[in-house]
Image (cartoon, rainbow, N blue to C red):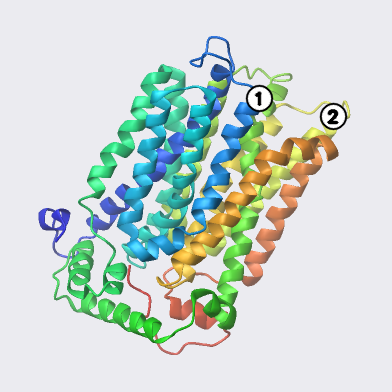
């Protein structure tokens, strides 16, 4: 039995273990946020003659550093769902954390271009696994009424990682930041050794008694609690049905009508979220600040600019964590995708009008940029991860998550490599207008086709997708 379960126990139905476990599970994503956030404030330093490398970095070096992570993320992301189902959520989380340790160690060893490109390539592993393994792990240890709030911790902790890197880069020397980056995954790796596997995966392995113990520990109740017994029986029943069905996951997706609808909804929302322009706004933030400073007193250093962006991201994530279980997934997704679209329209119009020689206030693009970043972090982005665990049974989450992640990383790679070329061809204003159209399409699609999943079981969601009215509430996937 896991050390943690034998040492930390609560009674009378306290679910504090779920909150603590959820925070620990999402710390690898905090570490990955530090990985991603480290590059932005370091580009100027790396390209300077006084930088840590014997030779200044070229634009080509920086380009490869920014994009190679997404190449390896696609390669490693493809089998990640299978590996998660084969070896378990805990083992793959340990692999994720270990890859983060290797990443920081490479940079501590050498800061020459080849070493940083190699480190960024290694970062492709957590770039995939953090968004595949961790949401599944998190969902399967969360009660049905907590999975939205706890799921939003993923993006919250990632944005804390971003902001931590931005602030540390502004206050500390390069080597100190690297040691701090290494400390986080190293500590959490040893903490994870004491963490339990999810009840659903334990049932899949035939460890029903251990699954009961873990579920009871998560809920702060006795192992003989009737609710625990019922939920474990439900998981066992679904597992037996799956074993009796010889169909592959993809065959089920293609042949089962509600599952296919859920797959289409997930894919469309995930791709539209990646093409909402959020990533490009982050890349172009410095340019927007520079243009804005021509008409208002907004003289911020590059580091102060990215810190401001990090604060806006974090505020959006905090809002999502606070309200996602109150508003529901659908309302939050509709409002935030629309808000991002409005911000993109304003950015597009500002760039177009000012390029024609007409004066517009400099605070306008800054406000629009902050709106995009805030709204994306407050709903559009976290919901795109939460719905995958809401819409699929535990037998299918790994495979569908891996597919959605590959689509997301391909989108990221295309944007980072081709955005500048596209802007040269058609102009930045038309590019931002394209992003706005994507956001409004996502908003409209969500209103028409997306089913509310808050506090709904898989049975209830699929009944709605298939157009059937469910008369009884048979709980098939209401367990963590």
Neighbour class for label 2 at 10 Å: few (<14), some, many (≥20)? few
- Between residue 211 and residue 293, name the one nearer to us: 211
**Which residue has dot 1 on it?**
59
Q: Is residue 261 above or below residue 136?
A: below
- Residue drawn at x 47%, y 87% is 470
User: Where does the image place residue 198, in percent across and percent down from the top left?
Assistant: 29, 64
Query: Can the viewer see residue 416 in this picture?
Result: yes
Q: Residues within 10 Å of mark 1 (few under 14, many from 20)?
A: few
- Above or below residue 467? Residue 79 is above
Identify the image quadrant of the N terminus.
bottom left
Q: Is residue 264 left or right of residue 440?
A: left
On the picture, is 144 further left or further right than 65? left
Q: Position of residue 262 (x, y in %)?
A: 56, 72
| Residue 40 location, quadrant | top right
At a point 64% along the width and 67% down the height, the residue shown is 447
Q: Nearer the viewer, residue 11 or 394?
A: 394
Q: Quadrant of the C terminus?
A: bottom left
Asked if 445 appears above or below 169 in the picture, the reply is below
In this view, the residue farthest toward the front is: 114
Report x, y in % for residue 94.
32, 49
Q: CA distance from mark 1 to mark 2?
A: 26 Å
Residue 355, which numbered label? Answer: 2
Name the mark nearer the viewer: 1 or 2. Answer: 1
Q: Determine whether 431 is above or below 320 in the image.
A: above
Location of residue 267 by image quarter: bottom right
Callout 2 secondary element? helix
């Amino acid at each position: 039995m896991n050390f943690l379960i034998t040492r930390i126990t609560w009674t009378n139905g306290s679910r504090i273990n779920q909150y603590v476990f959820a925070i620990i599970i999402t710390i690898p994503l905090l570490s990955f946020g530090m990985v991603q956030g480290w590059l932005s404030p370091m580009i100027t330093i790396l390209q300077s003659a006084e930088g840590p490398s014997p030779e200044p970095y070229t634009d080509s070096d920086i380009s490869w550093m920014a994009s190679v992570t997404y190449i390896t993320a696609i390669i490693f992301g493809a089998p990640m769902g299978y590996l998660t189902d084969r070896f378990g959520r805990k083992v793959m989380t340990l692999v994720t954390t270990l890859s983060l340790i290797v990443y920081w160690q490479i940079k501590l060893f050498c800061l020459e271009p080849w070493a940083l490109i190699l480190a960024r390539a290694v970062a492709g592993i957590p770039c995939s696994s953090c968004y595949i393994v961790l949401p599944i792990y998190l969902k399967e240890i969360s009660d049905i009424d907590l999975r939205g709030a706890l799921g939003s911790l993923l993006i919250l902790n990632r944005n804390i990682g971003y902001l931590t890197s931005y602030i540390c880069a502004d206050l500390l020397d390069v080597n100190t930041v690297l040691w701090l980056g290494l400390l986080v995954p190293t500590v959490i790796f040893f903490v994870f050794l004491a963490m339990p596997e999810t009840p659903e995966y334990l049932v899949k392995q035939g460890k029903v008694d251990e699954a009961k113990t873990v579920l009871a520990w998560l809920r702060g109740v006795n192992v003989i609690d009737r609710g625990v017994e019922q939920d474990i029986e439900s998981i066992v029943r679904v597992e037996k049905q799956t074993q009796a069905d010889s169909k592959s996951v993809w065959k089920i997706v293609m042949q089962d009508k509600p599952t296919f609808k859920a797959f289409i909804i997930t894919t469309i929302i995930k791709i539209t979220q990646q093409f909402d322009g959020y990533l490009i706004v982050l890349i172009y933030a410095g340019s927007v600040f520079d243009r804005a400073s021509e008409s208002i007193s907004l003289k911020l250093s590059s580091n102060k600019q990215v810190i401001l962006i990090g604060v806006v991201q974090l505020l959006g994530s905090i809002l999502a964590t606070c309200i996602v279980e109150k508003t529901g997934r659908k309302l939050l997704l509709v409002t935030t995708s629309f808000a991002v679209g409005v911000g993109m329209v304003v950015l597009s119009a500002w760039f177009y009008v000012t390029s024609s020689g007409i004066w517009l206030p400099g605070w306008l693009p800054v406000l629009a940029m902050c709106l995009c970043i805030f709204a994306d972090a407050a709903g559009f982005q976290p919901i795109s991860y939460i719905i995958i665990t809401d819409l699929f049974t535990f037998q299918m989450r790994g495979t569908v998550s891996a597919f959605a992640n590959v689509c997301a990383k391909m989108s990221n790679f295309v944007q980072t490599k081709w955005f500048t070329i596209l802007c040269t061809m058609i102009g930045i204003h038309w590019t931002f207008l394209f992003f706005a159209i994507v956001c409004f399409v996502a908003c409209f699609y969500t209103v028409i086709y997306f089913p509310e999943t808050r506090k709904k079981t898989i049975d209830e969601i699929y009944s709605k997708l298939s157009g059937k009215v469910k008369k009884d509430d048979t709980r098939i996937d209401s367990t963590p």
